[in-house]
Image (cartoon, rainbow, N blue to C red):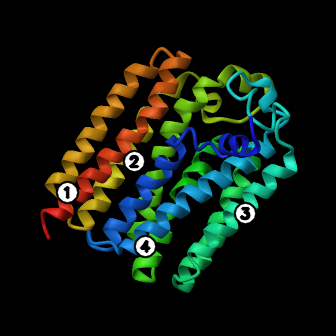
Amino acid sequence: MNRLSLYFRLIRLHKPIGILLLLWPTLWALWMASGGVPDWQLLLIFTLGTVLMRSAGCAINDYADRDFDKHVKRTVDRPITSGKIRPREALMVAAVLAITAFLLILQLNALTKQLSVAAVIIAGSYPYFKRFFAIPQAYLGIAFGFGIPMGFAAVQNSVPVEAWWLLVANIFWAVAYDTEYAMVDRDDDLKLGMKTSAITFGRFDVAAVMFCYAASFGILFAVGWQFGLRTWFALGLLVACAFAVYHYFLIRTREREGCFKAFNHNNWLGAAIFAGVFIDYLLRT
């Protein structure tokens, strides 16, 4: 396997689910902030930035977890863990990707640039934060949702309170889907002494996931209502609710395959919410 193929695997471009889970809330924000008519250049910048920053985050995560991943079934063959890529190479890849992402936003306003610095710090610290925080998925939700305040800043040169509530909704959503993900590795994480929400919630893990879905949808509905979103947005949320119920049936037995399938299916949940936002604005313009 050549170097480029290894770097491709390092930054998980063969598994785009992480990019999509970052992208959907960013698109929600851009549409709401712009009243349903986002500038195409902003869309391009934020889409490319999402790909670059998620990829950089994967490289940093694998560098930080290189001594743990060798003990986890799902991660034992990752490029660093398997010895195919040196740790310092991963850091170089992450640096190049992060710098490229920053170059994209140089043409945007000062507030967006300031928030981008916070986004990089949060993304870079997450792999270490999860070693001592009982529910690191909440911190992941901040990292995966920071495109929300950045999107509002880019469009409005300010971050209204509704944007922060939208970020809170994304945190609850992230705790839900990443707990499903953590349920896959729970046995390995227990042996390693890692902190995850699946371990913290214990036998209430499934109930906690469903509560987080409900909290996320409730906040999303309230924020959407503030922006004048009505019927189509509500229908999008109803579809998302139906998907969450489907996830319940996938994870209730706590089997690895079902939990991993539920995690991956969250792409469609985020897409359903965006479709509701998109159509609601489209039919009003």
Q: Which mark is residue 96?
A: 3
The answer to the question of whether label 4 and label 3 lie on touching residues, with beta carbons closer than 8 A, is no
List x then y, in percent, for residue 25: 42, 56
Tag in front: 2 or 1: 1
- Give how far apart the Cα atoms at labels 1 and 3 are: 37 Å
Q: Which mark is residue 279?
A: 1
- Give how far apart the Cα atoms at labels 2 and 4 are: 26 Å
- Give how far apart the Cα atoms at labels 2 and 3 are: 34 Å
Q: Tell me if 60 is positioned left or right of 217 in this view.
A: right
Tag in front: 2 or 4: 4
Q: Amino acid at mark 2?
A: Ser
Q: Residue at x 73, y 57 (%)?
A: 94
The answer to the question of whether label 2 and label 1 lie on touching residues, with beta carbons closer than 8 A, is no
Q: Residue at x 23, y 41 (%)?
A: 238
Along the polypeptide, which appears first: circle 4 or circle 3?
Answer: 4
- Give how far apart the Cα atoms at labels 2 and 1 are: 20 Å
